[in-house]
Image: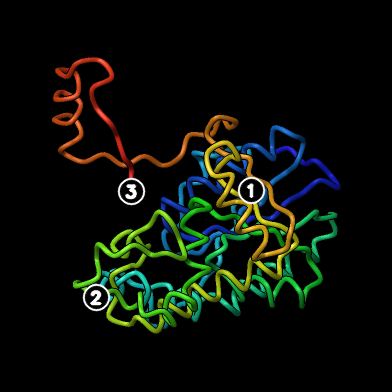
Amino acid sequence: MEERRGRRIIMFPLPFAGHFNPMIELAGIFHHRGFSVTILHTSYNFPDPSRHPHFTFRSIPHNKEGEEDPLSQSETSSMDLIVLLRRLKQCYTDPFRQSLAEEVGGGETMCCLVSDAIWGKISEVIAEEIGVRRVVLRTGGASSFCAFAAYPLLRDKGYLPIQDSRLDELVTELPPLKVKDLPVMETKEPEELYRVVNDMVEGAKSSSGVIWNTFEDLERLSLMDCSNKLQVPFFPIGPFHKHSDDHPLKTKNKDDDKTTCWLDKQDPQSVVYVSFGS
């Protein structure tokens, strides 16, 4: 990767495709504007750097050679997402601290750290220790973030945990959502979910700014609401893929061709497509 001295950004994505892809697209935007980019990535789900030759990739190890791997396929395959997030934070706190310190101490001026919002306090505390400005990336929409930020209120009002008898009830504090629309992940440890969400929100509040993979014409009211809650600079510059030449990791399953064949048989403009992520 070509060096662009004095204009380097370090990025710390969450190791899942739905979070890594927007981060790498954002990295492409930075690169096109003259920045060099270093991606600090967990050794868990480590990507193929050859797909992104413009960037420098550093793998952050989470266990020493010869030790049992706490993030092996056999260990993580049966975990729900919230439990896995806790394990990731436990395994990578100290290795990330060491990796970031090494990058910052390398002699080249670094502009800032861009970390996934879900890393929360890990990136906040470590960046503060090392003396690095931190911007967070929210890969999801502003509307869902508003709902996450309202979790304490929603719990106090009895909307959470969700009860089947209230699914069609209007959440008056978050119109036009109903209880069944609230962004709640299935987990055996709901209290851990609340901690993850609170950590994300508080980490965004203490950042130097939030980058959003959305745009004002789509989510103006939600962005205004989030801005009032967080009181930090906002950069709604999405959708990132419109501004980046880097191609994200794509997955394909056996039903893709069947779906495409079905779509080809439908009348023009007769199908509405809704994506719920990866």
Q: Which residue is mark 3?
A: 276
Identify whether 210 is placed above or below 28.
Answer: below
Please give the residue where the numbered disc 1 appears in the rendered image: 56
User: Which numbered disc, 3 or 2, marks the residue closer to the eye?
Assistant: 2
Q: Position of residue 77 (x, y in %)?
A: 26, 69
- Which of the two discs, 2 and 1, labels the residue nearer the N terminus? 1
Image x and y of residue 253, in percent: 21, 41
Label 2, on which residue?
Answer: 163
Query: Is disc 3 placed on a helix, strand or loop?
Result: loop
Q: Residue at x 14, y 25 (%)?
A: 262
**Up/down of 142 relative to 186, above or below:** above
Q: Which residue shows up at 54% across the image and 44% down it?
A: 219
Q: Secondary structure at mark 2?
A: loop
Would residue 215 appear left or right of 87 to someone viewing this image? right
Q: Which mark is residue 181?
A: none
The crowding category of the residue bearing disc 1, from other C-alpha atoms within 10 Å (few below 14, some 14 to 19, many at least 20), is some
Q: Nearer the viewer, residue 186 or 258?
A: 186
Query: Residue 134: image x %, image y %?
Result: 72, 63
Tell me whether the residue at label 3 lies in contact with that at label 1, contact meaning CB atoms closer than 8 angstroms. Answer: no
Instruction: Name the residue nearer the viewer: 163 or 118.
Output: 163
The mark nearer the N terminus, 3 or 2, is: 2
Measured along the vertical axis of the image, is residue 240 above or below residue 204? above
Q: CA distance from mark 3 to mark 2?
A: 22 Å
Disc 1 element: strand
Crowding near the residue tagged with mark 2, few <14, some 14–19, many ≥20 C-alpha atoms within 10 Å = few
Q: Amino acid at mark 2?
A: Gln
User: What kind of residue is marked 1?
Assistant: Thr
